[in-house]
Image (cartoon, rainbow, N blue to C red):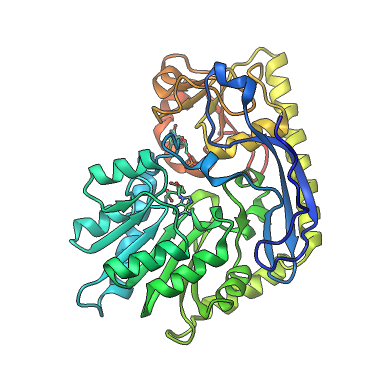
Amino acid sequence: MNPAPAAAPSCLVTGKPLEKIFSFGRMPIANGFLAPEQFADEYFFELAIGFNPESRMLQLTERVDERKMFHENYAFFSSTSAYMQRHFAEFAAKVSEAYLGESADPFVVEIGSNDGIMLQNFAARGVRHLGIEPSANVAAKAREKGIRTVSEFFDEKLAERIVAEHGQADAFLGANVMCHIPYIHSVFEGVKKLLKPKGVFAFEDPYLGDIVQKTSYDQIYDEHVFYFSAASIGFVAAAHGLELVAVEPQSVHGGSMRYVLSHRGARPVDASVRRQEDIERFLGLDRPETYVKFGRAVERSRDALMALLDDCRKKGRRVAGYGATSKSTTVTNFCGITPQHVEFISDTTPIKQGKFSPGAHIPVRPYEDFVKNRPDYALLFAWNHAAEIMAKEREFVAAGGRFILYVPQVGIEP
Ligand code: SAH
Ligand code: TMP
């Protein structure tokens, strides 16, 4: 057992006390796939959310040390999804067109560059670039592709070193990483120092509005310290002389938001910012009650999913998980899904195969095993990649296979 955290939780943005709104109970490391000999000393913490109305930030009340999550055995390789490769090619093209044209020698820096899925597009165009990726194994993959990468955690200090060595950046990019970093003020201060006067900071993360509207509670896990909105990003930016100048909803990862920031006053503020802030007030994202209601919806979703899985079990139907996602760790552990409900989880990532899922200890097997030994139902843990997966699994469906989904509602498809 791990020792209980000493301090009462406080808001990472304002430093004020943070009240726990909903608890998922004890959770393991979401990407901590493990071998049986590691079961006995598996690490657990309390996964719970709290909301600070002043900064509008929904966040975890307890956090896991980043070195326990991001290291030389990090299990998430961005390039496993062909769809995401296309997404980042488009993201890079958009940045090049909109923001790099004015610069004689553009320089692009990316935080959380992983295996180079985004920067490979700049490298291919001969654009000066630098990836920042603390997980050494995925950073090594990027370097193999010829992408310049430093394997460190980004913060204000590292930003100063980058400026000293390479000069300031035209664009600072990030995807699915800003929401991981609890020392958000240090990161924003670093960005402030790193950006040229007209430089842009463009990043995207799962969007709070989608999480609340779709009850996609599985976005909540150790790595996701924050659940951002236009209002909360605007609040943090203002504290560092930065400004939110545009937002753009994205369909990836179950509903994300791209935020574009610049130095205050350096660029015109697009109408999308005000529009999104209005939508957020309409959704009640500025009120704690919204998250109390969300908690109740999460419990109803859990009960419906377990009723379905228990029914499958009683009828002797075989269920396999599809995609050993980090999100699935919250679902299996919160709902109480066991290897009796889900025989195995199919995943294409070699580092996860042959291991067991965190907490629930469901075996993870290669995709070939799913094809050879098709179950009656595939519990779609990788629901955010549903379009890509459904297109690939026509044969499974033609042979009578069905998908179990739980976002936005529990149900069977097709
Ligand atoms: N951008 C990729 C990877 C997202 S996973 C994508 O969207 O697919 C998050 C990545 O951020 C991990 O590879 C992790 O090692 C990295 N990361 C975590 N904390 C970081 C920090 N402080 N600075 C830079 N990278 C960080
Ligand atoms: P993500 O939801 O965090 O992007 O993780 C997706 C996981 O699902 C990753 O481990 C790879 C796996 N996966 C498959 O096994 N098959 C697929 O077709 C896709 C798209 C993902």
Q: Which quadrant is home to the N terminus? A: top right
Q: Which quadrant is home to the C terminus? A: top right
Q: Is residue 388 above or below residue 305?
A: below
Q: In the current view of this chain or complex, which residue is farthest to the left?
A: 126
Residue 26 percent location from the top left of the image: 72, 35
Q: Nearer the viewer, residue 407 or 195?
A: 195
136 relative to 282 in the view: left or right: left
Q: In the current view of this chain or complex, which residue is farthest to the top?
A: 316
Q: Nearer the viewer, residue 338 or 11?
A: 11
Residue 63 percent location from the top left of the image: 65, 47
Q: Quadrant of residue 118?
A: bottom left
Q: Nearer the viewer, residue 3 or 68?
A: 3
Please name the residue shown 73% across and 68% down the image.
286
Answer whether residue 73 is visible to the viewer in this image. yes
247 relative to 6 in the view: left or right: left
Please name the residue shown 77% across and 66% down the image.
287
Q: Is residue 385 above or below residue 194?
A: above
Q: Quadrant of residue 54?
A: bottom right
Q: Is residue 326 above or below residue 85?
A: above
Residue 94 percent location from the top left of the image: 33, 67
227 relative to 138 in the view: left or right: right
Residue 204 percent location from the top left of the image: 48, 60
Answer whether residue 362 is visible to the viewer in this image. no
